[in-house]
Amino acid sequence: MFLNFAVVAIGILVSFFLKGINFLSLDLESVGGGILYPDFLLILVIFFALRRGDFSALWVGFFSGLLEDSGLLSFADKTGEFVPIIGTHALVYCLIGFILGKVHKLMDKDRVPTIILIVFVTSVVERIIVWLLVGVLEDFNKSFSVLGPSVYTALFAPIWIAGLSWVYKMQE
Protein backbone atom coordinates (compact mmCIF):
# COMPACT_ATOMS: atom_id res chain seq x y z
CA MET A 1 0.00 0.00 0.00
CA PHE A 2 2.75 2.44 0.96
CA LEU A 3 4.74 1.49 -2.12
CA ASN A 4 1.73 2.23 -4.33
CA PHE A 5 1.36 5.71 -2.79
CA ALA A 6 5.09 6.33 -3.16
CA VAL A 7 5.05 5.39 -6.85
CA VAL A 8 2.04 7.67 -7.47
CA ALA A 9 3.77 10.52 -5.60
CA ILE A 10 6.92 10.03 -7.66
CA GLY A 11 4.79 10.07 -10.82
CA ILE A 12 3.24 13.37 -9.75
CA LEU A 13 6.63 14.92 -9.00
CA VAL A 14 8.19 13.69 -12.25
CA SER A 15 5.20 15.00 -14.23
CA PHE A 16 5.50 18.36 -12.50
CA PHE A 17 9.21 18.75 -13.12
CA LEU A 18 8.95 17.58 -16.74
CA LYS A 19 6.84 20.67 -17.43
CA GLY A 20 9.76 22.91 -16.53
CA ILE A 21 12.29 21.29 -18.84
CA ASN A 22 13.16 23.73 -21.60
CA PHE A 23 14.05 20.86 -23.92
CA LEU A 24 10.35 19.98 -24.14
CA SER A 25 9.16 23.56 -24.65
CA LEU A 26 8.10 24.98 -27.97
CA ASP A 27 9.25 28.57 -28.52
CA LEU A 28 6.80 30.51 -30.67
CA GLU A 29 8.00 34.00 -29.74
CA SER A 30 9.39 34.56 -33.26
CA VAL A 31 5.84 34.38 -34.67
CA GLY A 32 4.25 36.46 -31.93
CA GLY A 33 3.38 33.60 -29.61
CA GLY A 34 4.83 32.54 -26.32
CA ILE A 35 6.56 29.48 -25.00
CA LEU A 36 4.43 26.33 -24.87
CA TYR A 37 4.93 23.62 -22.29
CA PRO A 38 2.98 20.35 -22.31
CA ASP A 39 0.83 19.84 -19.21
CA PHE A 40 2.15 16.50 -17.96
CA LEU A 41 0.17 16.75 -14.72
CA LEU A 42 -3.10 16.95 -16.64
CA ILE A 43 -2.06 13.93 -18.70
CA LEU A 44 -1.31 12.08 -15.44
CA VAL A 45 -4.77 12.91 -14.07
CA ILE A 46 -6.38 11.75 -17.32
CA PHE A 47 -4.30 8.55 -17.20
CA PHE A 48 -5.51 7.71 -13.69
CA ALA A 49 -9.10 8.59 -14.61
CA LEU A 50 -9.03 6.27 -17.62
CA ARG A 51 -7.15 3.42 -15.93
CA ARG A 52 -8.22 3.45 -12.29
CA GLY A 53 -11.47 5.37 -12.17
CA ASP A 54 -12.90 8.38 -10.43
CA PHE A 55 -11.64 8.07 -6.85
CA SER A 56 -7.96 7.61 -7.74
CA ALA A 57 -8.10 10.37 -10.33
CA LEU A 58 -9.77 12.68 -7.82
CA TRP A 59 -6.88 12.36 -5.36
CA VAL A 60 -4.19 12.47 -8.03
CA GLY A 61 -5.90 15.56 -9.46
CA PHE A 62 -6.06 17.25 -6.07
CA PHE A 63 -2.38 16.78 -5.23
CA SER A 64 -1.28 17.51 -8.80
CA GLY A 65 -3.31 20.71 -8.78
CA LEU A 66 -1.87 21.83 -5.47
CA LEU A 67 1.62 21.23 -6.80
CA GLU A 68 0.76 23.14 -9.97
CA ASP A 69 -0.58 26.05 -7.92
CA SER A 70 2.41 26.15 -5.62
CA GLY A 71 4.52 27.90 -8.23
CA LEU A 72 7.76 26.12 -7.33
CA LEU A 73 9.29 26.77 -10.73
CA SER A 74 10.05 30.20 -12.14
CA PHE A 75 9.20 29.48 -15.78
CA ALA A 76 5.69 30.80 -15.22
CA ASP A 77 6.85 34.39 -15.60
CA LYS A 78 7.55 33.94 -19.32
CA THR A 79 4.39 32.04 -20.17
CA GLY A 80 1.89 34.06 -18.18
CA GLU A 81 0.51 30.88 -16.62
CA PHE A 82 1.33 31.70 -13.01
CA VAL A 83 -1.73 31.35 -10.82
CA PRO A 84 -1.29 33.14 -7.50
CA ILE A 85 -4.44 31.61 -6.05
CA ILE A 86 -3.79 28.28 -4.36
CA GLY A 87 -6.47 25.75 -5.17
CA THR A 88 -7.64 26.71 -8.64
CA HIS A 89 -5.82 23.92 -10.45
CA ALA A 90 -6.55 21.54 -7.57
CA LEU A 91 -10.28 22.14 -7.98
CA VAL A 92 -10.21 21.87 -11.76
CA TYR A 93 -8.00 18.77 -11.81
CA CYS A 94 -10.24 17.12 -9.19
CA LEU A 95 -13.34 17.81 -11.27
CA ILE A 96 -11.68 16.60 -14.47
CA GLY A 97 -10.39 13.43 -12.82
CA PHE A 98 -13.75 12.69 -11.23
CA ILE A 99 -15.82 13.29 -14.37
CA LEU A 100 -13.47 11.37 -16.67
CA GLY A 101 -13.25 8.61 -14.09
CA LYS A 102 -17.03 8.28 -14.06
CA VAL A 103 -17.28 7.96 -17.86
CA HIS A 104 -14.04 6.06 -18.50
CA LYS A 105 -15.85 2.82 -19.35
CA LEU A 106 -17.54 4.54 -22.30
CA MET A 107 -14.23 5.46 -23.95
CA ASP A 108 -11.81 3.44 -26.02
CA LYS A 109 -8.72 4.34 -24.02
CA ASP A 110 -6.24 2.23 -25.99
CA ARG A 111 -6.43 4.02 -29.33
CA VAL A 112 -4.08 6.94 -29.96
CA PRO A 113 -6.62 9.20 -31.75
CA THR A 114 -9.02 8.79 -28.84
CA ILE A 115 -6.33 9.68 -26.32
CA ILE A 116 -5.32 12.75 -28.33
CA LEU A 117 -8.95 13.90 -28.58
CA ILE A 118 -9.67 13.31 -24.88
CA VAL A 119 -6.54 15.19 -23.81
CA PHE A 120 -7.16 18.06 -26.23
CA VAL A 121 -10.77 18.60 -25.18
CA THR A 122 -9.92 18.21 -21.50
CA SER A 123 -7.01 20.62 -21.79
CA VAL A 124 -9.15 23.26 -23.51
CA VAL A 125 -11.84 22.92 -20.84
CA GLU A 126 -9.25 23.01 -18.04
CA ARG A 127 -7.56 26.12 -19.40
CA ILE A 128 -10.85 27.97 -19.90
CA ILE A 129 -12.08 27.12 -16.39
CA VAL A 130 -8.76 28.15 -14.80
CA TRP A 131 -8.78 31.38 -16.80
CA LEU A 132 -12.34 32.13 -15.67
CA LEU A 133 -11.66 31.28 -12.03
CA VAL A 134 -8.55 33.41 -11.87
CA GLY A 135 -10.29 36.18 -13.79
CA VAL A 136 -13.17 36.29 -11.35
CA LEU A 137 -10.94 36.09 -8.27
CA GLU A 138 -7.99 38.21 -9.45
CA ASP A 139 -7.71 39.70 -12.92
CA PHE A 140 -8.39 38.37 -16.41
CA ASN A 141 -5.15 37.67 -18.26
CA LYS A 142 -5.64 38.77 -21.86
CA SER A 143 -2.57 36.88 -23.07
CA PHE A 144 -3.64 33.53 -21.57
CA SER A 145 -3.33 30.98 -24.36
CA VAL A 146 -5.84 28.15 -24.65
CA LEU A 147 -5.44 26.36 -27.97
CA GLY A 148 -1.64 26.34 -28.32
CA PRO A 149 -0.86 24.56 -25.05
CA SER A 150 -3.85 22.26 -25.54
CA VAL A 151 -2.63 21.08 -28.94
CA TYR A 152 0.94 20.67 -27.66
CA THR A 153 -0.26 18.72 -24.61
CA ALA A 154 -2.44 16.49 -26.80
CA LEU A 155 0.53 15.68 -29.04
CA PHE A 156 2.64 14.61 -26.04
CA ALA A 157 -0.20 12.59 -24.47
CA PRO A 158 0.24 9.24 -26.29
CA ILE A 159 3.95 9.15 -25.46
CA TRP A 160 3.48 10.04 -21.79
CA ILE A 161 0.50 7.71 -21.35
CA ALA A 162 2.48 4.85 -22.94
CA GLY A 163 5.33 5.57 -20.54
CA LEU A 164 2.97 5.71 -17.57
CA SER A 165 1.34 2.45 -18.64
CA TRP A 166 4.73 0.80 -18.74
CA VAL A 167 5.73 2.17 -15.33
CA TYR A 168 2.49 1.43 -13.55
CA LYS A 169 1.80 -1.80 -15.46
CA MET A 170 -1.93 -1.33 -15.15
CA GLN A 171 -3.23 -4.08 -17.35
CA GLU A 172 -6.97 -4.43 -17.27
Image (cartoon, rainbow, N blue to C red):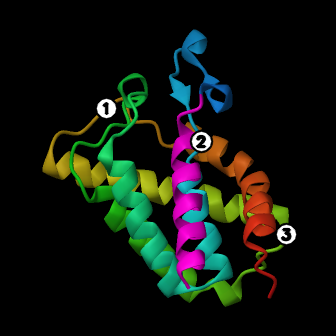
- Residue extending farthest to the right is 111
Label 3 vs label 2: CA separation?
Answer: 24 Å
Relative depth, front residue between 77 and 14: 14
Q: Does residue 133 appear in the picture of this structure?
A: yes
Secondary structure found at label 2: helix
**Above or below, comparing residue 58 to residue 117 in the picture:** below
Q: Is residue 19 magenta?
A: yes
Picture quadrant of residue 168: bottom right
Sequence-first disc among 3 and 1: 3
Q: Which residues are magenta?
A: 1-21
- Residue 142 is marked as 1
Which amino acid, mark 1?
Lys
Residue 75 pos. (x, y %): 43, 28
Q: Is residue 49 magenta?
A: no
Instruction: Quickly name the residue at label 3.
Output: 111
Q: Is 167 left or right of 13, judged from the image as shown?
A: right
Q: Residues within 10 Å of mark 3 (few under 14, many from 20)?
A: few
Sequence-first disc among 3 and 2: 2
Instruction: Quickly name the residue at label 2.
Output: 18
**Above or below, comparing residue 105 to residue 25 in the picture:** below
Which one is in front in this view, the residue at disc 1 or the one at disc 2?
Answer: 2
